[in-house]
């Protein structure tokens, strides 16, 4: 079997250190490795395999579409593209709007900004995003992201991007000790920045409505207040739902938890859109935004935008979510997962905060001291003991995702309840072994 350690550049990796196992198959929430072992996937890989691995409906849809038509460019029509657009508009309640298909999440966010600027008649209009956010790793997406790892590689101001503090209630940048108040203040910070820049100069605000790999889960007060702030100033609101959509946060789209009070003007999608079976992203436009650009030339597009094979997988994915009631299942299992994480918090002093739980997405933040909330390691560094925990879990057949001081629990929506329970039992045991008491803070 070919070994890619010396031939492939791997993303977000030091190449000399990369030594991951080779995956040869999968079923449900488990990955099959080349050595014959199986790994329980507690992160849906990059929070995208919401339907698990090798879901039969996705495999069959791709096979059937390949037999009919593998590719036609976006300049031509394709039946699965039209069908997927209709389903997305219907599921989101954006009837009368339009869908622009992309290759993934980063270019969905880039295209959303381009479309927003076109619709606002502000070709160089400012875009407001937030610190400690993630919107992709292309240059504009890095500019949009408030990501300490990549800030030195890009000049956000050159892209017209301005950042505001996040709704991080556990470490509220506004000094609030109340989560709801912190969320409101974070929304007010956006309003203040729009006012400082003057609304006529601001094209859009782009934010994650719920989950993100940054580990920040906004208080429920945040998104409706943000929607009011942008609407009052006639600034378009873009919801980056790349990770939070398709059941991950207990709804088809995370903003729907707030009803019409949370409806954005545009939203970006990827990851769970095809259950990661094939690369695909999308920008969904409200009908009012679509109407603004109906007679404008759209100077954008990539060769594979709206690829028929990927769109066929998207149609099958949306059908699977609905037919198998996975959105509702995520909501129920997410509540159980959150409660179990809280029980771990009661037993392990190293757990400072547990958040999420609207769906199968729970964040566990580890600390050196609960009273002071001192981190184990400066963000975004990962403490050595947490790395050791992850390695031991992998040896035991479970893959946990971490970032910085965070454990990110985001298993496929199809995970069996017994599998979920086994993974949390393992995590309990490993926390006791690697964090017998809260270590001293590292500065």
Image: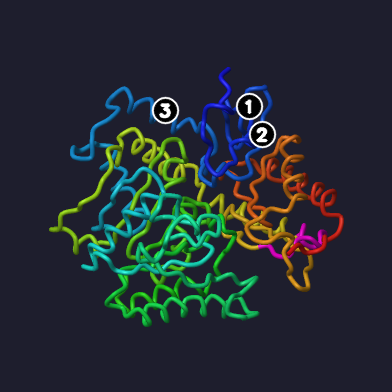
Q: In the displayed structure, would residue 22 be above or below residue 194?
A: above
Earlier sequence position, callout 3 versus callout 1: 1
Residue 41 appears in which quarter of the rendering?
Answer: top right
Report the residue at 68% width, 45% height from top: 420
Count residues near mark 1 (Cα–Cα under 10 Å), then give few for <14, some for 14-19, many for 20+.
some
Report the residue at 46% width, 53% height from top: 245
Q: What residue does disc 2 label? A: 39
Earlier sequence position, callout 3 versus callout 2: 2
Q: In the displayed structure, would residue 233 be above or below residue 68?
A: below
Q: In the displayed structure, would residue 204 be above or below residue 310?
A: below
Q: Between marks 2 and 1, how big is the CA–CA gap?
A: 8 Å
The answer to whether marks 2 and 1 mark residues whose Cβ atoms lie closer than 8 Å is: yes
SS class, disc 2:
strand
Toward the top, the furthest residue is 1
**Residue 298 is inside the magenta segment:** no
Q: What residue does disc 1 label? A: 33
Q: Between marks 3 and 1, how big is the CA–CA gap?
A: 23 Å
- Mark carried by residue 60: 3
Stretch of the chain drawn in magenta: 343-354
């Amino acid at each position: 079997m070919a070994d890619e350690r010396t031939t492939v550049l791997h993303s977000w990796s030091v190449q000399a250190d990369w030594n991951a196992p080779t995956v040869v198959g999968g079923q449900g929430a488990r990955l099959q490795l080349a050595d014959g072992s199986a790994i329980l996937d507690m992160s849906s890989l990059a929070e995208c395999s919401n339907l698990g691995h090798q879901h039969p409906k996705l495999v069959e849809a791709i096979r059937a579409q390949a037999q009919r038509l593998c590719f036609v460019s976006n300049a031509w029509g394709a039946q699965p593209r039209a069908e997927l657009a209709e389903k997305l508009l219907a599921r989101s309640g954006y009837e009368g709007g339009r869908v622009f298909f992309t290759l993934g999440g980063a270019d969905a966010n880039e295209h959303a900004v381009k479309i927003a600027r076109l619709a606002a008649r502000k070709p160089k209009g400012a875009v407001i995003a937030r610190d400690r956010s993630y919107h992709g790793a292309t240059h504009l997406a890095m500019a949009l992201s408030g990501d300490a790892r990549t800030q030195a590689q890009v000049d956000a101001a050159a892209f017209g991007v301005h950042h505001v503090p996040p709704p991080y209630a556990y470490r509220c940048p506004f000094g609030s000790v109340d989560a709801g108040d912190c969320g409101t203040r974070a929304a007010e910070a956006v309003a203040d920045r729009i006012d400082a820049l003057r609304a006529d100069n601001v094209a859009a605000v782009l934010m994650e409505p719920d989950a993100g790999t940054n580990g920040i889960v906004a208080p429920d007060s945040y998104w409706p207040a943000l929607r009011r702030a942008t609407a009052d100033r006639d600034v378009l609101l873009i919801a980056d739902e790349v990770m939070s959509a398709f059941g991950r946060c207990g709804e088809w789209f995370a903003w729907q938890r707030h009803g019409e009070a949370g409806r954005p003007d545009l939203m970006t999608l990827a990851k769970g859109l095809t259950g990661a079976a094939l690369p695909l992203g999308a920008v969904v436009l409200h009908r009012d935004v679509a109407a603004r650009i109906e007679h404008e030339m759209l100077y954008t597009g990539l060769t594979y935008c709206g690829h028929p094979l990927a769109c066929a997988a998207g149609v099958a994915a949306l059908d699977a979510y609905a037919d198998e009631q996975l959105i509702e299942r995520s909501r129920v299992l997410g509540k159980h997962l959150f409660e179990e994480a809280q029980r771990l918090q009661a037993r392990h002093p190293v757990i400072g905060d547990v958040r999420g739980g609207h769906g199968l997405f729970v964040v566990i933040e580890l600390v050196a001291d609960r009273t002071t909330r001192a981190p184990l390691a400066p963000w975004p560094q990962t403490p050595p003991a947490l790395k050791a925990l992850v390695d031991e879990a992998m040896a035991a057949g479970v893959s946990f995702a971490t970032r910085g001081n965070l454990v990110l629990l985001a298993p496929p929506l199809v995970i069996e309840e017994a599998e979920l329970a086994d993974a949390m039992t393992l995590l309990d045991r490993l926390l006791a072994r690697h964090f017998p008491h809260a270590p001293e803070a590292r500065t």
